[in-house]
Image (cartoon, rainbow, N blue to C red):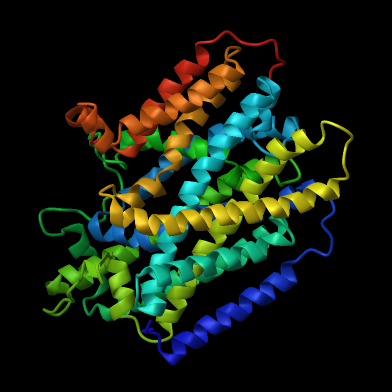
Amino acid sequence: MNSPFAPLDWMVLGLYTLLLFAGGWLFRPRRSQTARDYFLAGGRVPSWLAAISVLSATQSAATFIGGPDYGYRHDYTYLAGNIGGLIGAVFVARLMIPRYYAIGATTVYELLERRFDARAMRWAGGMFLIGRVFAGGARVYLAAIALSMVIFASVDAGGIVLSAGLIMIAAFLFTFAGGLRSVLLNDLMQFAIYLGAALAVLAWLWTTIPAPAAAIVAGLHHAPGGVDKLRVIDLSFDLTKPFSLPATVVGLSLLFIASTGTDQDVTQRLLASPDARTGARGLILSLVASVPVVWIFITIGLLLHVVYQRPELMGGRTLEAASEFKGQSINVFMHYILTQLPAGLRGLVTCGVFAAAIATTNSALNAMSSVMVQDFYRPWRERGAPLADRHFVIAGRWGMAIAGLAMFAMAVASFYWQRSSDMPLLEFALQVMVFAYAGLLGVYFTALFSARGSSGSVAAALIGGFAAVLALQPYVAGLLGLGAVVGKLAFPWQLAIGTIVSTLICLAVPGQAKPAV
């Protein structure tokens, strides 16, 4: 595999690698004796660090690559999703986080044990693990495509496997020794790197456009076809649009409640603060901080639109974009990285993709391990005599190894799946948590706002929510003869329908005699 990297690019990548090792050494804890230390950093995480870690965990390589692509094709309406985020954040901060702290939860699924029983907790934890393996593996695959293209000039199996392996090894090493504390400090470093890379690309793009700022803004406001690429709010009631205002208020608020209130990957950071108020503050701060970050990535896409499609702003000459790279579909940002960025900056952007992938992956490893150990292994192992807490720290490290292997296998399988199936793998896999979220939301709404439900109805609701979202996918809806009706629904509406179905299923059974949560 011949690499398009120049010596300066390799130098930048080498410095980044040294920084990774130095950070891993400096961030390692001197002692990590208890499971609470390992999975919740001892409950001493300040709100600002929790906020950055949440932001780093949610801003994956999909954001790094997909954000510019959205801006290139559309406008700023993705930013309006923060309206739904605000609704969801208030809900989680006021109604869910205090309950988790009240029961001293290590994982969010322990609340279901209090409300129903241990079987309900394991069903919910199992749904999370399945969804996170698919979503996490697909995100690793997406980052591996980008890294393989830039570093090896190849998208064959060897390049994908090697790139995915590098991501998984780096993420595992950062998380192995110190657990969540290492993850949090690593997230801070990786966030600074990929945000710095994005700002560098934004500045470079701006300098390559000869038109003055006022002309660029006017040109984006009045794009060809009467399109306003500076639009933020879409007031239309089009069920095929994922970021219209109705979809944002209904579906994206549910998505945010699920991702920050029922998904251990994100919520774990909010449970690691000294108290519920600090955790809730970290959640709100992460939402506020996400606005300028997402704005940067979308703005990169808008400037790419100018560079590739607006000759009147480019002195009469635009660049020509390619849609494929050696048979692999490629978006405009990846094409720009491969063909236009100068040496050094190309290496920095590669580090940014790598940083985004590591930050997302190591958080998933620790969260999955905490669920496997605290919700599955620990109750089984302590049926007899209690064990020293140090035993479960070691078990947590083994749990991360198992989770890492599962995610790596999914990333490699995605390479072959994409080539043997007509299904849009990346779009499906990056949104796969919606399948798990529908059932989880129905279960949690039942647990929080009613006295009904049982462990059996929890299991049925999780399966029913998954099945409802699956039935709304275009391919499946077509097989069911519903393609013309529901086959084009945007994912926020799919989540809303799936949540309604799962809630009704969970409510169908009278409640058990359990204390309120």
Q: Give the quarter of the image for residue 284.
A: top right
Q: In the rendering, at what x and y percent does residue 132 appear?
A: 52, 46
Count of picture labels: 0
Q: Given the current orientation, which residue lies at the most extreme bottom position?
A: 7
Vertical relation: 307 (above or below) 367: below
96 sits to left or right of 493: right
Q: Residue at x 82, y 31 (%)?
A: 383
Q: Give the quarter of the image for residue 94.
A: top right
Vertical relation: 258 (above or below) 176: above
419 sits to left or right of 121: left
Residue 306 versus residue 477: which sits nearer the camera? 477
Q: In the rendering, at what x and y percent does residue 454 appear?
A: 60, 16
Q: Quadrant of the N terminus?
A: bottom left
Q: In the rendering, at what x and y percent does residue 18 appear?
A: 62, 80
Q: Quadrant of the C terminus?
A: top right
Residue 293 visible within the image: no
Q: Residue at x 20, y 63 (%)?
A: 218
Q: In the rendering, at what x and y percent does residue 484 appear?
A: 17, 30
Residue 324 visible within the image: yes
Vertical relation: 241 (above or below) 56: above
394 sits to left or right of 490: right
Q: Give the quarter of the image for residue 467.
A: top left
Vertical relation: 107 (above or below) 118: below
Q: Residue at x 26, y 68 (%)?
A: 304
